Image (spheres, grey):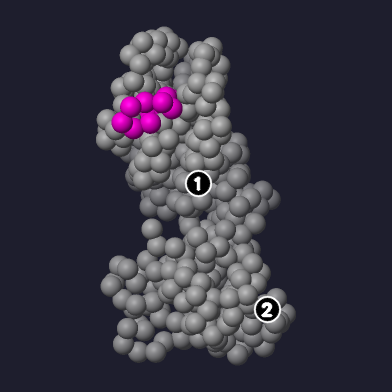
């Protein structure tokens, strides 16, 4: 197994003796080290390195530590910075933390204390990056999805095989790639096998041939999508093969067995005899089970997702984002979305494309009547007040997008007082920063 690279510690200090001393200490503590005599040179080269942490002296000629910290905000890569200060500069060090420094350490200091601080900074930064990147998974920001992201993050950090369970269209392939990306094996191959395409004639080539998935994975990941689609006669062979490889690995203490991620639409009924081997496969390859919520389970995310998909399509096709009518909002809110995010994305794309030339409604694209949907409360748990709130939320969201978060312009566009808008933003948990153009 390939060992992960040592974390890179960047040292910035104009005192050569201090640079040499810290460089020598961290080098012998198994860190990679890069040292600079001034902050300007370090900032110029920062994007060329995968720095884990920066140790920077506060008092330096030309560019002091505070200036380094301020310039760091404009950089693509922003590793945590630990400020080194003299005892008389504690107040400045506190100011540095307010401006984004991770922590400070006063001279003279014990190198072990600095190392402990470095490790804490690295671990916190990596954890925050993992959670931030996992939130890029396009599922939404509701409490349901936040809980899912937390579980996804926890599972990514383990070495267990994972069974992903979710309906068609929820993005199981993207979930699998996210698990790989944020695992300790993210530098190793990710082999994707769509079992829906694995006929019995190709089974031996994929699983037993010289170029089989075990050899190709090189101790990385194997994603068996639609595991339940493997032909019945092939399931017993696959089960026997996996059990054999697992036993070999246990007996010889080999660590070159790939980590498996599998996906199914649902866990099969164990009482059905024809699914016995499938259940055994799921049990063997699903040490942990990850349920991906269907879109109807987090309907609060529909407008955020639909706006995002419309923006992507508008950008791709160089088109404007069409406004949603009251009936469009009702249709989006009330529809049950059997195709989940995949269907929502396709409707958003069609809505953008067709509205370039003709007025098209969401209900027309869904081939359903919005009146029928609103008039069937037993099927849709939506009352008039909730639907109106959805519409109001959507109008404010579109106005915030159009005005790039400019509150005064949004108030003028919606013809409402600033105080009313602020109350609405608080009510719908909208944050102006989310709409600012960067």
Is residue 272 visible to the viewer in this orientation of the structure? no
In this rendering, is residue 384 above or below 319? below
Which quadrant holds the C terminus? bottom left
Q: Quadrant of residue 19?
A: top left
Residue positioned 43% across, 10% down in the render: 25
Labelled disc at residue 132: 1
The residues tagged by marks 2 and 1 sit, at their Cα atoms, a distance apart of 31 Å
Where is residue 53 shown, x and y percent of the image? 43, 28
Q: Residues within 10 Å of mark 1 (few under 14, many from 20)?
A: few
Which quadrant holds the N terminus? top left
Where is residue 368 shown, x and y percent of the image? 53, 85
Residue positioned 54% across, 85% down in the render: 415
Quick one: SS at disc 1?
Answer: helix
Where is residue 107 shown, x and y percent of the image? 51, 17
Check whether the beta carbons of the residues at disc 2 and disc 1 lie within 8 A of each other: no
In this rendering, is residue 28 above or below 179? above
Q: Position of 378 compared to 104: left or right? A: right
Q: Residues within 10 Å of mark 2 (few under 14, many from 20)?
A: few
Q: Quadrant of residue 391?
A: bottom right
Region in magenta: 51-64
Would residue 198 be counted in the magenta stretch?
A: no
Q: Nearer the viewer, residue 41 or 361?
A: 41
Mark 2 lies on residue:
386
Quick one: SS at disc 2?
Answer: helix
Residue positioned 47% across, 46% down in the render: 133
In this rendering, is residue 127 above or below 105? below
In this rendering, is residue 17 above or below 203? above
Is residue 135 visible to the viewer in this orientation of the structure? yes
């Amino acid at each position: 197994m390939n060992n992960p690279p040592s974390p890179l510690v960047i040292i910035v200090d104009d005192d050569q003796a201090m640079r040499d001393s810290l460089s020598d200490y961290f080098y012998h503590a198994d860190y990679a080290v890069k040292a600079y005599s001034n902050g300007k040179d370090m900032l110029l080269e920062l994007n060329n390195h995968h720095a884990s942490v920066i140790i920077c002296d506060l008092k330096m000629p030309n560019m002091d530590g505070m200036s380094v910290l301020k310039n760091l905000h404009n950089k693509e890569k922003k590793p945590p910075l630990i400020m080194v200060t003299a005892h008389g500069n504690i107040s400045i060090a506190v100011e540095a933390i307010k401006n984004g420094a991770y922590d400070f350490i006063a001279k003279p200091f014990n190198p072990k204390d600095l190392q402990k601080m470095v490790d804490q900074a690295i671990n916190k930064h990596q954890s925050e990056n993992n959670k931030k990147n996992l939130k890029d998974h396009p599922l939404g920001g509701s409490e349901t999805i936040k809980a899912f992201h937390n579980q996804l993050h926890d599972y990514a950090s383990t070495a267990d095989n994972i069974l992903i369970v979710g309906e068609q269209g929820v993005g199981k392939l993207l979930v699998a790639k996210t698990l790989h990306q944020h695992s300790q094996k993210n530098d190793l191959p990710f082999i994707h096998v769509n079992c829906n395409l694995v006929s019995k004639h190709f089974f031996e080539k994929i699983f037993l041939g010289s170029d089989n998935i075990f050899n190709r994975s090189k101790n990385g990941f194997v994603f068996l999508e639609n595991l339940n689609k493997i032909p019945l006669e092939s399931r017993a062979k696959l089960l026997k093969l996996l059990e054999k490889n697992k036993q070999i690995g246990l007996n010889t203490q080999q660590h070159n067995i790939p980590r498996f991620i599998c996906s199914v639409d649902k866990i099969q009924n164990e009482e059905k005899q024809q699914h016995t081997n499938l259940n055994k496969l799921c049990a063997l390859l699903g040490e942990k089970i990850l349920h991906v919520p269907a879109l109807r389970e987090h309907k609060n995310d529909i407008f955020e997702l639909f706006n995002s998909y419309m923006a992507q399509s508008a950008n791709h096709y160089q088109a404007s984002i069409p406004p949603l009518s009251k009936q469009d909002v009702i249709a989006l809110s009330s529809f049950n979305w059997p195709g989940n995010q995949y269907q929502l994305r396709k409707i958003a794309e069609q809505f953008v494309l067709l509205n370039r030339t003709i007025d098209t409604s969401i209900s027309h694209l869904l081939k359903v009547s919005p009146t029928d949907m609103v008039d069937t409360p037993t099927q849709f748990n939506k009352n008039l007040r909730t639907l109106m709130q959805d519409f109001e939320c959507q109008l404010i969201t579109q106005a915030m997008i159009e005005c790039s978060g400019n509150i005064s312009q949004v108030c003028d566009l919606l013809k409402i007082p600033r105080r009313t808008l602020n109350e609405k933003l608080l009510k719908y948990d909208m944050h102006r920063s989310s709409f600012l153009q960067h």
